[in-house]
Image (cartoon, rainbow, N blue to C red):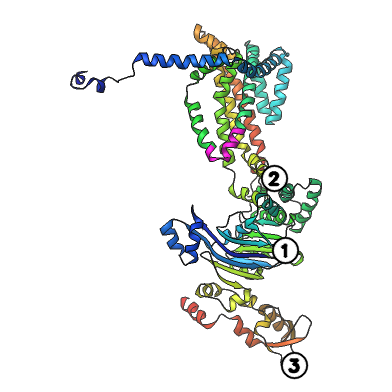
Amino acid sequence: MAICEFLPRAFCRFPAISDSYIRQARQVIDDGFRGLVREYGYIIDALKAPLQWFLNYLERLFTTSPWTVVLIVMLVVVYFGSRSIRITVGTAIGMLLIGLVGLWEDTMTTLAIVTVSTLIAIIIGLPIGILMARSERVQGVINPILDVMQTMPSFVYLIPVVVIFGIGKVPGLIAVVIYAVPPMIRLTNLGIRLVDKEVLEAADAFGSSRGQKLWNVQMPLALPTIMAGINQTIMMSLAMVVVASMVGVGGLGRNTLQAINNQFFTYGFLNGFALVAIAIIFDRTSQAFGMRLQRHSEVVHG
Amino acid sequence: MASHGIEIKGLYKIFGANARQHVEAVRNGLSKAELNERYGHVLGLKDINISMPAGGITVVMGLSGSGKSTLIRHINRLIEPTYGEVVYDGVNVCGMNERDLREFRRHKTAMVFQKFALLPHRTVIENTVYGLDIQGVPRSESLKKGQYWIERVGLTGFENHYPNQLSGGMQQRVGLARALTNDADILLMDEAYSALDPLIRVDMQTVLLDLQAELKKTVVFITHDLDEALRLGDKITILRDGQVVQQGTGQEIVLSPADDYITAFVKEVNRGRVIQAKTVMKPFDGLADGVRIEATTTLEAAAKAMTESGQTKATIIDEAGTPTGTLDLQTMMAAMVTPAGSDTSKMAAE
């Protein structure tokens, strides 16, 4: 650039810290990280073990059971969750189509990991959300962390996960949970904070303890919002399952990854549609269930 | 029957970060406006002293912003006072620790709210037994009590409805049933009927008066409506800008308003419904003729009795039936019409 001739060098080219310094710093951090993992490997393994066991158990249950049994159980769950014939029939059609194109087993694998990661996300997210709703300070600390978690590209999650936990199903599962837990936390917090102040005052006036207020008033009234959080968490797990296939998670995600690498156009889309089908089933069922939970607010006095 | 009254002694409430520091200044005459302007603090209540009799209805009346809702929330300490005491049964509520306060709220008080504040996810019967749930009373027992009070407030058949399915008046009946099921001595009613239609409001006032005649709880009733205050209150306290302007029975307030503010209020009141026969009667003249009327009868009721019997004179009797005074139509009319000063100004306005 011509203008650079008249300017000091530092104003024109960004004066970056010298490459060797950065290289050194990176090395120190990376080595420290690896050393830490090596040092406390037994703790990490102990943490992984129950997840591994649960995930393997569920996956084996889903994939080795006859498809007829799995389908019937699924339809029963969907029907009692949604109380809707339409959603149940839609589920049956979707699952049969998936089976027809030969993706039944992969779908079961994906279903297992999404189920486990959603459960873990709820178990982690709910208490954190409750804590956040109760304390401004906790909210002040956790909110920026959630912001970072939600804006960080999902691929970046995989790096620390792989460094700490290695390659495999459980690291993939952990990545999925990290990705899917923020909406659960946020919407639990929001739901509790939105509870009518007057009803809370009434709870106080009748002498409720904090626990009684939480379980009698705040949780039931926040439930529709919390259900929306669970719904979001499921949707995000399904999205992340594809990305997590890069660190060794099987199922529909791995097929998609293969399709990208080999330019299998049709195969890729079949797997994509299978994911869409599962997503719709989860979404509609959980939403219908959420609506049923707030039946009390539907019938308004005219 | 409630055994203890509530004594509010020297209560101050200032909203703001350093509220306590300003109590002394307010006591020495710092005005509400000055406090707000100079220190950014809001004066809620100033030197409130009220003695609320056991078993009676004390009405606290004031317009919005007068501090009446703040005041009632001090009785069960939903709001912390800045200074002062609320004494019930020898104990200062404002000095209780968290556990004692919770027990006090559970067993001694029950509250009815302006906007009902029912739990939307609970049915009518479940809302009614809410206080007992909190106390840990088993449902087998609490449902019986709840059912009784649902019947008493006239909601039989709606036990399994959700609050959203009911009209405002019916929702407030649930609110009342919920408070009564608690079987507490103190009943706090925070503008309980202000959100209701006029007809339903009168209806609910009757429900409260009927129940109170039998239960004799210590009721604290907040309202901005003087007619409601006069109808319900055994004792009326009028608040303005966080201060008590006048306390007394309905009659006392109507007959001798403390200042122009209250005079303006009282002007529109139907005096015949407030003033009692004994207040305006003449000494007994020895002739027990005419209709016999009890001393506490309102002038309106007395006038009705006299007109129906075609008499122009009545004998006032006390509880024992002994004649204590006489009353003629002219005296009654004079007492029932609004005093001259305010009357002419009203006519001028028309």
Give percent across and percent down for residue A157.
51, 20
Is residue B224 covered in magenta? no
Name the subunit of mark 3.
Answer: B
Foreground residue among A90 and A34: A34
Please tell me whether the stretch drawn in magenta is mainly helix, strand or loop. Answer: helix
Q: Secondary structure at mark 2?
A: loop
In the image, taking residue B183 as reference, residue B270 lies left or right, namely left
Q: Which residue, given by chain and number where applicable, does mark 2 sit on?
A: B122
Compared with B209, A13 (above or below) is: above
Residue tagged by mark 3?
Answer: B287
- The residue type indicated by label 2 comes to Arg
Distance from Cα at disc 2 to Cα at disc 1: 27 Å
Above or below, comparing residue A270 to residue B159 in the picture: above
Quadrant including the N terminus of chain A? top left
* Disc nearer the start of the sequence (3/2): 2
Tag in front: 2 or 1: 1
Residue indicated by mark 1 = B217
Please tell me how crowded label 2 is: few (under 14), some (14-19), or many (20+) other residues with Cα within 10 Å: some
Start-end of magenta stretch: A127-137
Q: SS class of the residue under badge 3?
A: loop
Q: Chain of mark 1?
A: B
Q: How many marks?
A: 3
Q: Residue at x 54, y 8 (%)?
A: A258
Q: Position of residue B158 (x, y in %)?
A: 73, 50
Mark 2–mark 1 contact, CB under 8 Å?
Answer: no
- Say which label, 3 or 1, has the lower sequence index: 1
